[in-house]
């Protein structure tokens, strides 16, 4: 018996309507198994991780470049332990002894902190060489000794480049100190002389050292520094308080020593005669050799008309008074009294009575 063949009506699309090529993602997703889904998700995660790592690496490279630039410019600031800061590389121009203004700086640091970090340069041994900020470093060390507080164990410091040139380090120190109100010409001259004496600097001439270190100073100021350097070369061992010598006294005395070499012997003798003198007395002694003389400018020009040469004293002596020492020079027609006091501040009538009493005493038989 033969079977009947059944027929079904199926709607088939037109052949041109059937897409040719890749199977749509939607269709693949419908047929994808668990393993294929896991592989796809893992690949996607790896791709995202790689993109994140590339972004982090690019940011790190940018930050490293920026850090190198900031470090080169000395703009990196960190807290450096005090015991890792040394002052061996540069010769300092600060005068020795106690700093009268250090207490004021310490009070400011206690109250508001350090507003201006010091500047240091890293060394190969892990320590840091001080370039700028000696007084600030001294204040921190003093505060640590006095209080023992952890706040003063380290100090904010700008960290410069380890490969900085020695001359650049000196210039940074000098340029900062040029704005100090209390720095003297003798201190600046001492720095120039020590710089020239150090063979490492390859600058044996003091005049060249002044030109190099004080390049930002005016020509006139550099001339004054050179004059003081010459003065210290001739009298340095005898001067106990060179930092208090006024500019005009030091410059004019140097000019007079140039004009009269024998004057060095007389000035030296006068300084040796008073070994226990104070700073004010030392200035009085030096001023005595330049008074009544025209002021000579650094360029060699003379200001004003030349004054007559002072008469040589026939009698010289000193008087020990309750408030200091008075020096007397007496010669024909001239009597000179010197003491470290402002006679112009004394009432005129009182001064007249004292002078009159003086002459009355002289005339007594």
Image (cartoon, rainbow, N blue to C red):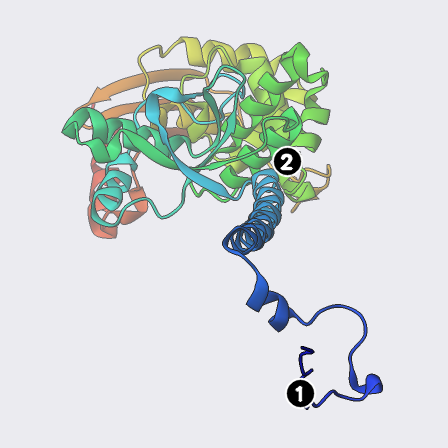
Q: Which residue is mark 1?
A: 8
Residue 109 visible from this viewpoint: yes
Distance Cα–Cα, label 1 vs label 2: 109 Å
**Mark 1 vs 2, N-terminal side:** 1
- Residue 161, percent across and down? 59, 32
| Residue 261 visible to the viewer | no
Q: Nearer the viewer, residue 6 or 319?
A: 6
Q: Mark 1 falls on what kind of element? A: loop
Residue 212 percent across, percent down from the top left: 69, 31
Q: Where the N terminus falls, by quadrant? A: bottom right
Residue 213 tag number: none
Secondary structure found at label 2: loop
Observer-nearest of 350 and 119: 119
**What residue lies at 74% left-to-right and 87% top-to-bottom?**
12
Q: Are marks 1 and 2 in contact (CB under 8 Å)?
A: no
Q: Nearer the viewer, mark 1 or mark 2?
A: 1
Outermost residue toward the front in this view:
1
Give the quadrant of residue 199.
top right
**Circle 2 residues within 10 Å: few <14, some 14–19, many ≥20:** many
Quadrant in which the C terminus appears: top left
Residue for badge 2: 214
Task: Left or right? Give the position of 46 relative to 285.
Answer: right
Q: Residue at x 64, y 32 (%)?
A: 168
Q: Residues within 10 Å of mark 1 (few under 14, many from 20)?
A: few
Residue 64 in percent (x, y) is at 59, 42
Residue 15 vertical placement versus 344 (above, below): below
Residue shown at 69%/42% (left/top)?
Answer: 219
């Amino acid at each position: 018996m033969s079977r009947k063949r059944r027929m079904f009506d199926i709607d088939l699309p037109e052949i041109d309507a059937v897409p040719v090529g890749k199977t749509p993602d939607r269709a693949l997703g419908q047929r994808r198994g668990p393993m294929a889904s896991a592989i796809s998700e893992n690949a996607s995660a790896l791709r995202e991780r790689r993109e994140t790592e590339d972004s982090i690496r690019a940011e790190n490279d940018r930050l490293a470049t920026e850090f190198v630039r900031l470090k080169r410019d000395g703009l990196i600031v960190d807290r450096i332990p005090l015991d890792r800061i040394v002052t061996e590389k540069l010769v300092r121009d600060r005068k020795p002894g106690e700093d009268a203004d250090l207490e004021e700086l310490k009070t400011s640091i206690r109250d508001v902190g350090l507003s201006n970090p010091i500047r240091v340069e890293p060394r190969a041994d892990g320590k840091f060489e001080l370039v700028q900020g000696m007084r600030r470093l001294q204040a921190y060390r003093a505060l640590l000794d006095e209080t023992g507080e952890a706040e003063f164990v380290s100090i904010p410091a700008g960290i410069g480049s380890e490969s900085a040139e020695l001359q650049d380090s000196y210039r940074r120190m000098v340029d900062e100190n040029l704005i100090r109100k209390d720095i003297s010409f003798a201190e600046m001259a001492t720095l120039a002389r020590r710089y020239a004496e150090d063979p490492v600097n390859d600058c044996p001439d003091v005049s060249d050292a002044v030109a190099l270190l004080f390049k930002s100073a005016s020509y006139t100021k550099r001339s004054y520094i050179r004059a003081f350097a010459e003065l210290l070369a001739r009298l340095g061992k005898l001067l106990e308080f060179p930092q208090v010598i006024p500019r005009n006294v030091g410059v004019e005395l140097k000019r007079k020593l140039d004009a009269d070499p024998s004057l060095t012997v007389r000035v030296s003798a006068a300084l040796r005669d008073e070994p226990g003198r104070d700073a004010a007395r030392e200035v009085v002694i030096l001023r005595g050799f330049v008074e009544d003389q025209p002021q000579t400018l650094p360029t060699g020009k003379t200001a004003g008309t030349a004054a007559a040469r002072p008469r040589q004293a026939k009698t010289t002596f000193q008087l020990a008074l309750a408030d200091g020492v008075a020096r007397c020079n007496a010669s024909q027609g001239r009597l000179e009294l010197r003491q470290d006091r402002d006679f112009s501040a004394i009432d005129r009538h009182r001064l007249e009575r004292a002078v009159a009493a003086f002459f009355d005493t002289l005339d007594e038989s």
